Amino acid sequence: MSARRRQRSAASSAARSDSGAKRTGGAQSTGAVGSGEMRAGGIDWTAASAEEIVPALAASELHLDAAVAGAIRNRVAQIVMAEPAEGLAIAQALLGAMQRRARGLDAETRAIVWRAHAEACLLSGRTRMAHRSYERASRAATAARQPGLLGEILVGRVHVLSLVGQTAAVERLARRAATLLRRAGNTIYLGKLYMNRGNAHYQREDYPRAHEFYRKASDVFAEAGLEDATWAGLLINQAIAASHLGRVGDARRIFLEAEAACQRLGLDALCAHARYDRAFLEAAGGDYRAALGLLEDAGEIFEREGMLDMTASAQRARAEIYIDLGMAEEAIELARGAARRFAKEEMPLDAMIARVHEGRALLRSGQPDESAEILQKAERFFLERKLRPRRADALLQQARAQLAAGEMAGAARHARQARGVADRLGLARLRTQAEGVIAESLLARRRFADAERILAPTLKQARRQAAPQRVALWELAGRVA
């Protein structure tokens, strides 16, 4: 697998999680909370722990209104960045309190509660629940005629919709959110919207546009002097984009800056995100020991904090590396487990990417027919969703499965299709790998001169490949010679 592809498939999950939607910023108010409402029932909502807040929310005498809900939502936003499970516990208790008082609550209060729940679900990897809670928050804010609050909620919805593949809705809601936020003069959330629009472009593998929106967000945050969880998350996204644009030195520097910022701010879960993504930068350079160490450390934090999507992402990432190391059985188990977790969270794109890794691992374990079946499904899935780089990779993997099965003509045909997509999209690494498969099929048919002709320019690009692909190309060239 190419360095570019490995980074892409791993980093996509981090890009999903490092959003303005999740990184709402601990001090960001909904606008509903005045200084007199920070304390109710003897509890200071701005500093209380989950152990204090959860029982208080269960008390029948608690008066829940927009001010109290807003104060608790702000506290959730603070806690959830460092302790996702604790933040989620508060958000769920707040939702329970609202549901017990449903008839007596106004629409603004309901909007704030559903928003708090959506944000906590998103950071803890519960994408399906976050999607539904954001929808309810939007309806309630609209009913309350609170355009400023609705604009902030739509920022979160833009991100979630990009995760579940509703790209048309992303653009529509992003335009609406921008209009509402500009009218309200809310520049911070406009920066978060830029960040989430960058994430949406990242999901479509449009890295230059993603980088452009991240830069816009960075400019907004710098002007505001913002150095909080949102800003730290943006650093990670910028590092990911830099890695895809071939700026490896910049990517490593920004990753380390992000890790240091997270440690300084006490954001352990976000620090795990930074280490998770940096692992793929190390793997691309061939340092698998360091990469696996970073992934295992990050995975333990994700699992401890109940971050379902990122736990699955760590599984999938380790599967990729195990494939390169020839540990096929371990990779199959990890990839299948990741696919199940993603499917449960209604994240079909991530689930299918995990299935592709399963297909690759099956091929490595000597099961080309089973591999080809999975890869054919993946190629159709990516074609339907117009994810051209993903489709090109699935075609390439199908070609490799056909090589292993002795179907040389089919292997060459699929590899040429992959090469065509790579040429149109400017994916140099994928093109190089596709030409390697074409040369392999020519070699098997004893067309040595044609294989050598294909490989000659390809070998000049070999040093741009990750270590396993570089070695494979040189080994193939040796057999041709």
Image (cartoon, helix red, strand yellow):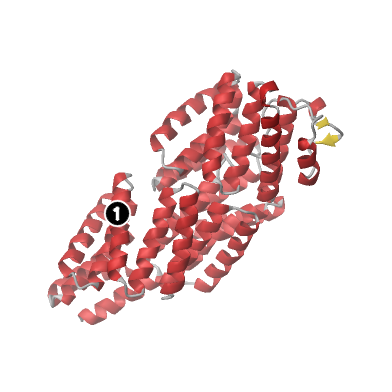
Relative to the observer, which residue lies in front, 457 or 105?
A: 105
User: Is residue 452 found left or right of 380 in the rendered image?
Assistant: left
Q: Which residue is mark 1?
A: 379
**Residue at image point 55% right, 51% down:** 236
Q: Quadrant of residue 455?
A: bottom left
What kind of residue is marked 1?
Glu
Q: Nearer the viewer, residue 284 or 87?
A: 87
Question: Is 399 situated left or right of 151 in this image?
Answer: left
Q: What residue is rendered at 42% in x and 68% in y?
A: 332
On screen, residue 442 above or below 9: below
Q: Is residue 407 left or right of residue 365?
A: left
Of residues 283 and 454, the one nearer the viewer is 283
Residue 285 coordinates in the image, percent (x, y) = 46, 68
Classify 10 Å Cα crowding around label 1: few (below 14), some (14-19), many (20 and above): many
Residue that extends furthest to the right in the rendered view of this protein = 42
Q: Evaluate whether residue 457 shows in this view.
A: no
**Residue 312 in view:** yes
Query: Would residue 216 appear left or right of 397 to someone viewing this image?
Result: right
Q: Position of residue 292 (x, y in %)?
A: 54, 69
Residue at x 25% of width, y 64% of height:
399
- Could you tell me residue 479's position as x and y percent? 23, 81
Q: Quadrant of the C terminus?
A: bottom left
Instruction: Quadrant for the N terminus, please.
Output: bottom left
Work out which residue is located at the far top of the displayed protein and give it.
145
Residue at 65% from the left image edge and 30% from the top image edge: 112
Image-quadrant location for residue 400? bottom left
